[in-house]
Amino acid sequence: MAAWSDALSLLKKHNVKWEAPTILHGRAVDGVARQIYAPRPVDARSFAVFCHEIGHILGNDEVGSWNFALEQARSFGLPVEEVKRTIRVYLFQNNPSLLPYFQ
Ligand SMILES: [Zn+2]
């Protein structure tokens, strides 16, 4: 199995700058900056948030960015169901209206 930290390779692939904030939520600054603020990907939750913010840089909306995170988990050979579970917990706490998209 690949490591969660393999997600760091997405930064180079998509020309995105990254900073780890002290908070747990991520943020993406689109346009020329191509900058994300996200936790270092060390587990399913941080991986999901990290990839979600890159998803926004690539022009995805909320649902699209979470799907991007799931796609990346799949392509890295990481446990997709675990990532989906953490996304559902995150959405339950922060954006419950999107839960139906991630059954
Ligand atoms: Zn988002």
Image (tube, grey):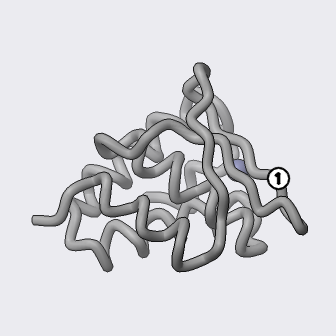
Residue drawn at the location 10% of the way across and 65% of the way down:
1
Q: Position of residue 40 (x, y in %)?
A: 43, 40
Q: Residue 66 sits in which quadrant?
A: bottom right
Location of the C terminus (image quadrant): bottom left
Question: Does residue 67 appear to the left or right of 26 in the view shown?
Answer: left
The residue pinned by badge 1 equals 29
Q: How many marks?
A: 1
Q: Is residue 64 above or below residue 75?
A: above
Please tell me which residue is depicted at 66% across the width and 41% down the height of the picture. 37
Which quadrant of the figure has residue 84? bottom left
Q: Secondary structure at mark 1?
A: strand
Is 101 rendered above or below residue 59? above
Amino acid residing under circle 1: Val
Residue 29 lies, in percent from the top left, at 82, 52
In this picture, residue 80 sits left or right of residue 69: left
In the displayed structure, 3 sits above or below 75; it is above
Q: Residue at the spot x=62%, y=32% of the render?
A: 25
Residue neighbourhood size for the residue with mark 1, other residues' Cα within 10 Å, grouped as few (<14), some (14–19), many (≥20) = some
Position of residue 44 measured from the top left corner of the image (x, y, whole percent): 32, 45
